[in-house]
Image (tube, helix red, strand yellow):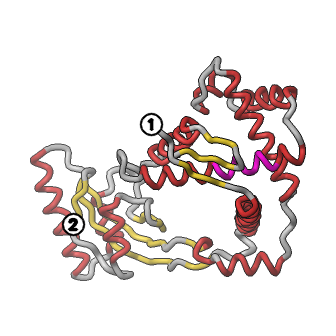
């Protein structure tokens, strides 16, 4: 299939290049394996290329061609931002020496940017009421994570013979705690350095080994875990407190809320601009004869 946008034919190479860029992005994030999302990425590539083409066409119609001087200046600026010419080519995946194609891409970028600047302009200062409404509508994004506080006993066996002893010693210490002994005092015998402490303090998910985290967040305050085996050694946890997940006050996270509010606003206006160009344009997919 060939893509024709307002009588401008989009090459298969342009669509494939966009597809490859999208797929590489998701592969780098570890979110795709082989070809399982190729259909989705093909559609996204087509959508991205269509949007850029429509924006560029509208910009050229309104403001004319981008000057060679502007392209050269922008390209130099981009290379400086990337830390030099060599790093620029490495980061962007563009081929050194393919000057015509690179300048064409830069010219389109400038063209699109000037239309967006004209249509959307600078970000306004949101008023307090609309900011509060946005914050409350997206409160799940502004929650403090649940936290747990715990103390632990830990033994790292140095050889096979020490493995059994470590388990037996920790099991016996746990039994003492269950019978009423103080956990902190009982844990002292397992501290190897003077500066070591049994108290782990408060921690959130992701701060501990997964095997310990699952147990700690499953226990109640005052509860002592069984002996836990990890690749570091043997552990016993004693939960001493917890903090539930709760909203971060708007005053504390205002900068983040403002940034996200403006990002959503800008995305909405961009979509409205593109939808308007699609409505008045002609976009065709035609079969290509082989």
**What residue is drawn where x is 64% and y is 17%?**
97
Residue 278's place in the image compared with 231, above or below, is: below
Front tag of 2 and 1 = 1
Q: Secondary structure at mark 2?
A: loop
Which numbered circle lies on residue 183?
none
Q: Compared with residue 284, is residue 126 higher up or lower down, i.e. above or below?
A: below
Write the start and end of the magenta stretch as one range. Answer: 50-58
Q: Position of residue 197 (x, y in %)?
A: 41, 59
In-front residue for pair 174/35 = 35
Q: Quadrant of residue 100?
A: top right
| Residue density around tag 2, few if under 14, some if 14–19, many if 20 or more, within 10 Å | some
- Quadrant of the image occupied by residue 270: bottom right
Residue at left offset 80%, top offset 46%: 113
| Residue 227: mark | 2
State whether the magenta stretch is mostly helix, strand or loop.
helix
Q: Earlier in the sequence, mark 2 or mark 1?
A: 2
- Residue appearing at x 87%, y 66% in the figure: 125
In the figure, is residue 68 to the left or right of 25? right
**Residue at 48% across / 48% down in the picture?**
26
Q: x, y (%) of residue 152?
A: 34, 65
On the question of residue 90 being in view, the answer is: yes
For the residue pair 191 and 25, the one nearer the viewer reads as: 25
Q: Residues within 10 Å of mark 1 (few under 14, many from 20)?
A: few
Helix, strand, or loop for circle 1?
A: loop
The residue furthest front is 289
Percent position (x, y) of residue 188?
32, 62
Residue under label 1, please give it.
Answer: 290
Locate residue 253 relative to residue 25 in the image: left or right: right
């Amino acid at each position: 299939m060939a893509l024709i946008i307002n009588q401008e034919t989009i090459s298969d190479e342009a669509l494939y290049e966009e597809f490859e860029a999208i797929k590489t992005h998701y592969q780098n994030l570890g979110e795709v394996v082989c070809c399982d999302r190729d259909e989705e990425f093909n559609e996204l590539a087509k959508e991205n290329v269509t949007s850029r083409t429509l924006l560029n066409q509208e910009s050229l119609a309104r403001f004319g061609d981008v000057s060679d001087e502007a392209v050269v200046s922008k390209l130099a600026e981009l290379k400086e931002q990337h830390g030099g010419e060599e790093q620029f080519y490495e980061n962007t995946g563009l081929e050194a020496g393919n000057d015509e194609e690179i300048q064409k891409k830069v010219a389109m970028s400038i063209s699109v940017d000037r239309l967006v600047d004209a249509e959307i302009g600078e970000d306004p200062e949101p008023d307090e009421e609309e900011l509060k409404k946005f914050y409350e509508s997206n409160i799940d994004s502004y929650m403090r994570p649940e936290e747990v506080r715990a103390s632990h006993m830990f033994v790292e066996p140095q050889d096979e013979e020490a493995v059994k002893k470590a388990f037996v010693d920790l099991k016996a210490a746990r039994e003492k705690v269950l019978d009423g002994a103080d956990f902190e005092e009982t844990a002292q015998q397992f501290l190897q350095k003077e500066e070591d402490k049994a108290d782990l303090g408060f921690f959130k998910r992701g701060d501990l080994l997964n095997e310990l985290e699952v147990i700690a967040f499953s226990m109640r305050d005052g509860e002592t875990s069984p002996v836990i085996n990890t690749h570091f050694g043997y552990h016993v946890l004693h939960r001493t407190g917890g903090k539930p997940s709760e909203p971060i006050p708007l005053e504390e996270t205002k900068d983040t809320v403002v940034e996200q509010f403006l990002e959503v606003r800008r995305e909405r206006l961009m979509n409205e601009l593109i939808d308007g160009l699609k409505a008045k344009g002609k976009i065709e997919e035609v079969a290509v004869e082989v």
